[in-house]
Amino acid sequence: MTVAITGKAVQAEEAASVPLDAEELKRARAARVEAIGKWVVPIVITIVTIWLWDRVCAWNEIPHYILPDPALVYGTLIEDWPILAGALVNTLKITFGALAIATVGGLGLAILFTQSKWIEISFLPFAVILQVTPIISIAPLILIYVDSLSVSLLICAWIVAFFPILSNTVMGLNSADHNLQNLFKLYGANRWQTLLHLRLPSAMPYFLSGLKIAGGLSLIGAIVAEFVAGSAGSGSGLANQILESSYRLNMPRMFATLQLISLTGILIYLTMNLISHLVLRKWHESALKREV
Amino acid sequence: MTAMVQTKMLKDPAASPAIVSLKGVSKTFSNGTVALNNLSLDIHEGEFVSLLGPSGCGKSTALRIITSLTSPTSGRVEWPQEETKQKEHELSFVFQEPTLMPWAPVFANVWLPLRLKGISKRDAHDRVMEALEMVGLAQFSKSYPRELSGGMKMRVSIARALVTKPKLLLMDEPFAALDEITRFKLNNDLLNLWETFGWTVVFVTHSVFESVYLSNRIVVMAARPGRVVNDMPIDAPYPRDEKFRTSPVYSGFCREVSEALHAAMDAGDHL
């Protein structure tokens, strides 16, 4: 082992003292350019797109009730912020509430399913039925049956979000390394120990990729449910802002709301990616940097 | 002094009591393959036994039957030295792959067998570090498996097997996936540990040279159906080292075992 360490140290010293050759320098420069470009290029492209949008509006003299220019949209975003912020908070409550229940519920059901073949055989059909029936077609029913509006919205968003977590986690729990399973059996591990120390850690990458999908889906579920509820005439989420703007042909506000929704979606996605990275960075292939 | 006694005892391991006996064990898989046919084998205390044979001769299956990971279709496994109702046998298993938990650091991987017996991290600490010390990896206890080389991972796997202080160590081609230099090094380390602690080892391999170098008894097996065709003592004194590896005695044994293995394969269907 000592040999290995000194070997590494010698290599490091060599790298420090020996001047890099031309090719190595070129590679290093390319890596630096890529590191900066990764951030700069998307930002530049976005700015150019917004500028083009502005120019298209100006050159063609498009009226603002058909396509508002970016300045008007962002102006409206600031001007209408009190109304939009309230709607945003309501939508976020539903989104994260649904995501939380979907996470707990999906994980719990997955564990239950893998503990007994019979439970899985009995209840999997229901999970599949919930998943394959379009939420927009069940939503009116839920809105009629459930008194509280926010509870019915939560249920709708949950139905959309929980399935990827369930199916991914079941897959993960069942994909624990067979030799490790044998090892646990050999050392007399009970069911609970095997679950805690082997199956759950093995399922973690699968669960997290389910969570990434569920994050986006719970926002979609919340918005769809709001649309259905909104057409019944109540509620105050972002979807209602879009509906209301469309009735009044208030295009700037509709665009401003759309911006908020996509921004929320992006933030949820980035958050899930960060969580996944933080949990897996120590060991999983997907989170590891590779030396070239 | 201990080493002296050990060596003396090893001179005639067949005389020491059996630690595990396979009595007329057969195993037929659900697809009809006969993996083992009427295998009877006594493993004596302090022995280093190699099960040597071509692939498909049932040597790994025999090992799995000893661990009770697989149950025999007929015949039985006896543990003469244990209480009749003992739940687990005092054995450890080393797989062909290191089989480490990638999400856990080296320490937690070695702690696992003790943890499953309900021993806390603090209580297990000294034993885990002792086991890591034995394989020379004490300073890597906080590393993750991915940060280690193939040979180091295998050492961790061996440390995990040793941490429970087993009476019987079962190894299923543990070094087959390693390069020759690493394999020789680990062979020597394994022999040193075995001579120091005097446990019993059953070592599955398909390498004639490895089996002669390590063991004091080689059980040659043949395939289709899996059976024992030869049981040969290797009466070369321990400690064995690189000098032994190049000695005429060693090559003599290798030739003998190699011939036995070829006879076993010719008896089969030339595969």
Image (cartoon, coloured by chain):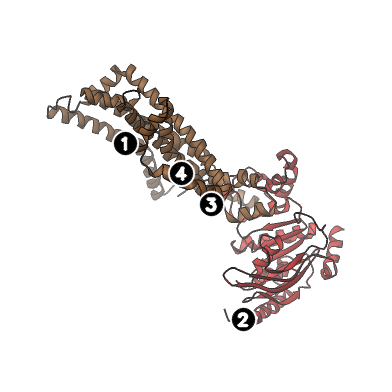
Chain colours: A brown, B red
Q: Position of residue A240 (x, y in %)?
A: 31, 25
The quarter in which the N terminus of chain B is drawn is bottom right
SS at mark 1 in the image = helix
From mark 3 to mark 4, how far is it between C-alphas? Answer: 21 Å
Residue, far front: A145
Label 3 and label 1 in one chain = yes
Callout 3: SS: loop
Q: Chain of mark 1?
A: A
Q: Which residue is mark 2?
A: B268
The residue to which callout 3 is attached is: A175
- Which of the chains bears the disc numbered 2? B
> Does residue A280 appear to the left or right of A39 in the view shown?
right
Give neighbour class at mark 1: few <14, some 14-19, many 20+ (Cα, 10 Å).
few
Q: Nearer the viewer, mark 3 or mark 4?
A: 4
Q: In this rendering, is residue A33 above or below B58?
A: above
Residue at label 1? A42
Above or below residue B268? Residue A36 is: above
Is tag 4's residue or tag 1's residue first in the polypeptide sequence?
1
Q: Nearer the viewer, residue A127 or A77?
A: A127
Spatial CA distance of label 3 from label 1 is 37 Å
- For the point 48% across and 46% down, the residue is A168
Question: What's the residue type where badge 4 is placed?
Answer: Ala
